[in-house]
Image (spheres, rainbow, N blue to C red):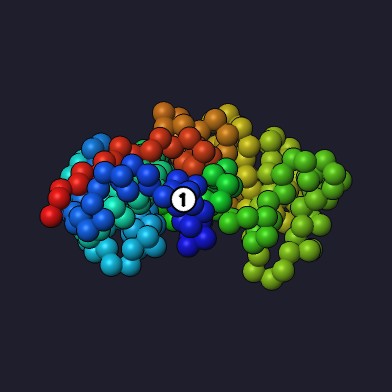
Amino acid sequence: MQELIDRALQEDLGSGDVTSLAVVPANALARARIEQKAPGVIAGLQAAETVFRRLDPGLRWHAHVEEGEWRNSGLVAEVAGSAQWILAGERVALNFLGRLSGVATLTARYVQAVDGTGAKILDTRKTTPGLRALEKQAVLAGGGHNHRTGLYDAMLVKENHSALGGGVGEATRKALAAAPEGMAVEIECATLDEVDEALGAGAKSILLDNMSLDELREAVSRAKGRAETEASGGVNVDTVRAIAKTGVDWISVGALTHSAPALDLSLLLDPL
């Protein structure tokens, strides 16, 4: 996170905040209030605090909320100290906080939509380059769950792998044989026949790709007691509950991280 924040500050500050340096006295002190202006879940407080402390360790930060709490509006945090440094960090801190709170908020909407069904909401690798760790933390703050972190910590045999690996059944056997002990192996299936192939080869986790509700129900029935199931594709806030009611264990939603709108936040500064 530190390296990421340093790059973001360099991108915004460059050689310095020329406006504040010209207008704001060097010894001016201020207290700034970060306000939430729309309903949602706050996430990214640590990143925002680190932005300010990286610029000036003497800045005082106080959060008024905990991550993961749904709230309609109100005071999020305060930061006090050098007015020039608060203004220098304002946009970068709000960019992190707004973006990550947006991910947490959209995740919470999906989690609320499937409440009571038993299905759990998963994120994907469709993250902003460089922000994956922070965005996945925001998904957790919103009540969702993390899928694999990257290509290295779990196997997901997708259609391209199966096409190159001898078909779904053969690719499943190869993946299971090669996986280190304890590593998750999931097999993507686009048809019920592929579900049967994967199950026959010993798959314990199956991704059901772009299946109809009837196909999902049938796939869940065939996998019951043999493998957990994940639905993927065609998922939005309006469709997710019907998908959850088919009995799938997991529902992965790429939109959590690739399409979440930023939560509306502002920073208001009072001179001291």
- The residue located at (35%, 50%) in the rendering is 88
Question: Is residue 97 among the parts visible in the rendering?
Answer: no
Residue 143 image point, x, y percent? 38, 51
Against 236, is 156 above or below? below
Reply above or below: 236 against 5: above
Q: Nearer the viewer, residue 242 or 24?
A: 24
Helix, strand or loop at disc 1?
loop
Screen quadrant of the C terminus: bottom left
Please tell me in which quadrant of the rendered image residue 99 appears. Answer: top left
Q: Residues within 10 Å of mark 1 (few under 14, many from 20)?
A: few
Where residue 25 appears, as percent x and y from the top left, is 23, 52
| Outermost left residue | 272
Does residue 271 appear in this view? yes
Q: Is residue 230 left or right of residue 178?
A: left
Q: Which residue is mark 1?
A: 15
> Which picture quadrant has residue 29?
bottom left
- Classify 182 as above or below 201: below
Residue toward you, 5 or 122: 5
Look at 54% across and 30% down and name the residue there: 234
Q: Residue furthest bottom?
A: 181
Name the residue nearer the viewer: 221 or 131: 131
Residue 3 x/y as whole percent: 52, 60
| Residue at left offset 57%, top offset 43% | 126
